[in-house]
């Protein structure tokens, strides 16, 4: 069955309606649920941390915190766990 944007995804008979996570990997997920951080980074950083600036941090902080809050609110409604 072809996946259609906005259609709930299911895994193992469980349906997940999420804008952040696609358990079937038909589209890139905005969150990674199944891997520990040390499995994806040997030095504790992703990307190029040497390019960071205070101004970039000030711009990113409200965007990141809003996205995390929105994800946690949604995650709290998941019936998977």
Image (cartoon, helix red, strand yellow):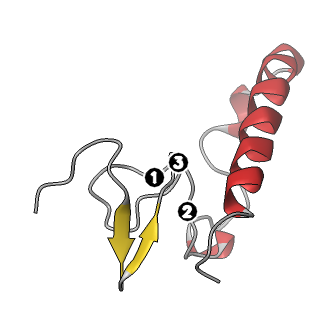
In front: 42, or 29? 29
User: Percent from the top left, x then y, of residue 52?
Assistant: 76, 27
Q: CA distance from mark 1 to mark 3?
A: 4 Å
Q: Are marks 1 and 2 in contact (CB under 8 Å)?
A: yes
Q: Which residue is mark 1?
A: 29
Q: CA distance from mark 2 to mark 3?
A: 7 Å
Q: From the viewer's perspective, tell me whether residue 44 is left or right of residue 8.
A: right
Q: Residues within 10 Å of mark 3 (few under 14, many from 20)?
A: few
In front: 13, or 57? 13
User: Percent from the top left, x then y, of residue 72?
Assistant: 76, 55
Q: In this picture, is 40 found above or below 52?
A: below
Q: CA distance from mark 1 to mark 2?
A: 7 Å
In front: 64, or 19? 19
Q: Which residue is mark 3?
A: 30
Task: Give the residue at x 68% y 61%.
Answer: 75
Q: In this picture, is 81 found above or below 35?
A: below
User: Percent from the top left, x then y, of residue 22?
Assistant: 41, 59
Q: Are marks 1 and 3 in contact (CB under 8 Å)?
A: yes
Q: Secondary structure at mark 2?
A: loop
Q: From the viewer's perspective, tell me whether residue 3 is left or right of residue 39.
A: left
Q: Secondary structure at mark 1?
A: loop
């Amino acid at each position: 069955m072809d996946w259609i944007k906005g259609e709930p995804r299911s895994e193992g008979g469980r349906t997940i309606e999420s804008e952040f996570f696609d358990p079937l990997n038909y589209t890139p997920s905005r969150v990674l649920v199944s891997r520990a951080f040390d499995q994806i980074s040997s030095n504790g950083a992703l990307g190029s941390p040497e390019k960071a600036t205070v101004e970039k941090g000030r711009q990113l902080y409200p965007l990141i915190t809003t996205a995390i809050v929105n994800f946690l609110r949604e995650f709290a409604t998941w019936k998977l766990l």
